[in-house]
Image (cartoon, helix red, strand yellow):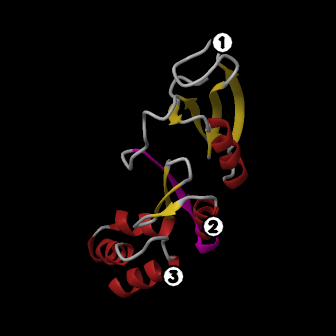
C-alpha cells in the first residue's frame, strides 16, 4: 500500500465495484482482496473487508463498511477525456451499468460513487479564463454528459 491511498466506502460491493472499474478505465486494476479475520458489525469472518485497487493510476482501497455511510458529491473521481468518443465510453459505461446522470459532466455509479467525466477542452477553456471560460462554463451548465463539439463551438465563438 502506498503512503497516501483513497479509501472508498461500500456496502458489501467493493470487489464488484473495483472489478467493474478495471473493465472501464485504462491503468485500472484490482491489486488485492482481504478477508475479515473476525465477525464485524456489518459482516462475518471470511467476508471481503477491503479491496486494494487502482483507478487510472490512483491507488484506492474499497472498504466494505456497511450501509450506514452514503456517498455524496463531496467526493468524486474526475476522469479527463480527450474526445467525445472517450467521454461517451466512460459515461455510458457508468450510467449504463445502473448509474445515474447528473449535471455538468457528473454521474453516479450504481454503488453511489460520483464521477466527473471531463473533456480536456472544457478544463483548458476554464483555465484560459476570460471570455473562453465564460462561454465554456455557460455551455456546460446546460449539459448532463459534456458535448465536446458544443464546448469547442462556444470557445471558438468567444474568440
**Callout 3: few (<14), some (14-19), or many (20+) C-alpha neighbours within 10 Å?**
few
- CA separation in Å, label 1 and label 3: 52 Å
Q: Is residue 2 left or right of residue 69?
A: right
Q: In this view, does 90 lie to the left or right of 153?
A: right
Of 79 and 72, nearer the camera is 72
Location of mark 3 (residue)? 149
Numbered mark located on residue 97 in the image: none
Relative to 44, residue 78 above or below: below
- First-in-chain label (3 vs 2): 2
Looking at the rendered structure, the secondary structure element under dot 3 is helix
Q: Mark 1 points at which residue?
A: 37
**Which of the two discs, 1 and 2, labels the residue nearer the N terminus?**
1
* Image position, residue 113 (x, y; %): 50, 47
- In the rendered structure, does residue 78 fall within the stretch colored magenta? yes
Tell which circle, 1 or 3, labels the residue nearer the N-terminal end.
1
Can you tell which mark lies on residue 86? 2
Image position, residue 31 (x, y; %): 71, 31
Where's residue 119, x and y in %?
51, 66
For the residues carrying marks 1 and 2, which lies nearer the camera in this image? Answer: 1
The one nearer the camera, 39 or 79, is 39
Q: Which residue is drawn at 68% across and 20% down?
A: 35
Assign a secondary structure to mark 2. helix
Read off the magenta span.
75-87
Amino acid at each position: 500500500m502506498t503512503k497516501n491511498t483513497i479509501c472508498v466506502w461500500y456496502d458489501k460491493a467493493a470487489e464488484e465495484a473495483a472489478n467493474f472499474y478495471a473493465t472501464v478505465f485504462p491503468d485500472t486494476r484490482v491489486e488485492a482482496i482481504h478477508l475479515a479475520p473476525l465477525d464485524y458489525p456489518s459482516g462475518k469472518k471470511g467476508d471481503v473487508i477491503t479491496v486494494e485497487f487502482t483507478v487510472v493510476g490512483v491507488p484506492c482501497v474499497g472498504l466494505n463498511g456497511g450501509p450506514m455511510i452514503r456517498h455524496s458529491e463531496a467526493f468524486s473521481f474526475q476522469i479527463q477525456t480527450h474526445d467525445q468518443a472517450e467521454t461517451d465510453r466512460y459515461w455510458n459505461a457508468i450510467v449504463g451499468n445502473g448509474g445515474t446522470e447528473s449535471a455538468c459532466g457528473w454521474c453516479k455509479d450504481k454503488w453511489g460513487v460520483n464521477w466527473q467525466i471531463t473533456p480536456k477542452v472544457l478544463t483548458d477553456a476554464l483555465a484560459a479564463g476570460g471570455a473562453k471560460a465564460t462561454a465554456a462554463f455557460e455551455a456546460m451548465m446546460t449539459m448532463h454528459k459534456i458535448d465536446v463539439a458544443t464546448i469547442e463551438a462556444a470557445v471558438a465563438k468567444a474568440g
